[in-house]
Image (cartoon, coloured by chain):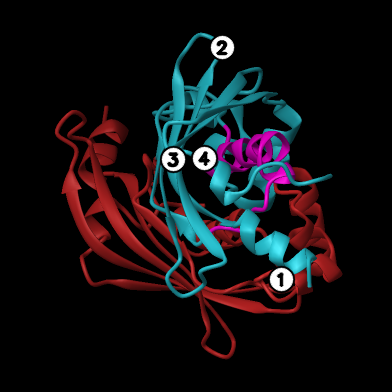
Chain colours: A cyan, B red
């Protein structure tokens, strides 16, 4: 896929609709079995008895599902070079099988990397909500992008 | 499994060795295909050409692998009730297939929840490093635990 989003294009205030993903019970269970095998992520009764109120997706699964939307709708057609981490992540409400999550990304700020001037770091606010508007996740995540100018210079060599 | 770690047992300064996990290439690829299908997580050549220096695990995969260690070595025998999110997460170095990651958790602080006095929130520092000592992840994560006193009162009802 050709690159259409560079560091230069990520202007503070710009928002990207990341679309939706459906939360499948089978995948909630397989993610939990692999990475977060706590009873309330694996068993309906244990979920009901917990403060989550029912069988719930691992927060790491929710974050991973939203990452997939971010990649499909934005990063895959960008000059993304990865991320140094997450500034903050809040799991705001339990995510249940059958939920549909809608996500969005908004540019908060950006700056050139002093150590690697061909790269810039763009900080995004990433949000996910259910169809009824219940917010389930809030993230602030810095992501590295190559500059268009740097890639054009490389191509011209 | 019976519960042996309650809110009361999580004393600031206490450290838990979370053991190790081996990073399998097949799992790096399958996680990336499901949740983070960027070229440097799926293809050796694209990895080499990127600032990651080689085919690398998604940061979300690294976080999930460390979560599995945290569950197996600590949470599964605790009164854990989930987590409200992550205060910060740093991906400090690329994780490659063939790496072995060793993780540890240290209690930073703890407090009772004002809204739910049967619960307390314990903030952990979570670290992961390769066999050669290279640090790959640093997290500060608050986790909810039921109080022993509250569970004993419940059992006695």
Residue occupying image coordinates x 81% and y 65%: B46
Say if mark 2 contacts mark 1, CB within 8 Å. Answer: no
Instruction: Please tell me whether mark 2 sits on a helix, a strand or a loop.
Output: loop
Find disc 1 in the rendering and name its residue: B23
Residue occupying image coordinates x 75% and y 62%: B40
| Main secondary structure found in the magenta portion | helix
Dot 1 and dot 4 within a common chain:
no
**Residue B55, can we see it?**
no
Please state which of residues A111 and B64 is positioned toward the viewer in this rendering: A111
The Cα–Cα distance between marks 2 and 1, rounded to whole angstroms, is 36 Å
Earlier in the chain: of badge 2 and badge 3, it is 2
The Cα–Cα distance between marks 3 and 1, rounded to whole angstroms, is 26 Å
State which chain disc 3 sits on: A
State which chain disc 4 sits on: A
Say if mark 1 contacts mark 4, CB within 8 Å. Answer: no
Which of the two marks, 2 or 1, is nearer to us in this view? 2
Left/right placement of residue A7 relative to residue B141 reads: right
Dot 2 and dot 4 within a common chain:
yes
Q: Which residues are magenta?
A: A57-83
Find disc 3 in the rendering and name its residue: A139
Mark 4 neighbour class, 10 Å CA radius: few under 14, some 14 to 19, many 20 or more: many
Which of the two marks, 3 or 1, is nearer to us in this view? 3
**Residue B133, can we see it?**
yes
The Cα–Cα distance between marks 3 and 4, rounded to whole angstroms, is 12 Å
Find disc 4 in the rendering and name its residue: A59
The Cα–Cα distance between marks 2 and 3, rounded to whole angstroms, is 19 Å
State which chain disc 2 sits on: A
Instruction: Please tell me whether mark 3 sits on a helix, a strand or a loop.
Output: strand
Instruction: Please tell me whether mark 4 sits on a helix, a strand or a loop.
Output: helix
């Amino acid at each position: 896929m050709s690159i259409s989003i560079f560091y230069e294009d990520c202007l503070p205030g710009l928002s990207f609709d990341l679309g939706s993903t459906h939360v499948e019970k089978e995948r909630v269970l397989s993610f939990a079995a692999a990475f977060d095998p706590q009873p309330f992520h694996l068993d309906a009764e244990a979920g009901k008895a917990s403060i989550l109120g029912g069988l719930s997706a691992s927060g790491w699964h929710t974050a991973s599902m939203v990452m997939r939307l971010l990649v499909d709708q934005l990063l895959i057609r960008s000059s993304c070079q990865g991320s140094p981490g997450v500034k903050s992540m809040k799991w705001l409400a339990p995510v249940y099988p059958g939920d549909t999550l809608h996500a969005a990304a908004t540019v908060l700020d950006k700056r050139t990397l002093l150590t690697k001037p061909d790269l810039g770091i763009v900080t995004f606010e990433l949000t996910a909500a259910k169809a009824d508007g219940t917010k389930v996740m809030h993230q602030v995540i810095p992501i590295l992008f190559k500059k268009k100018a740097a890639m054009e210079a490389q191509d011209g060599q």
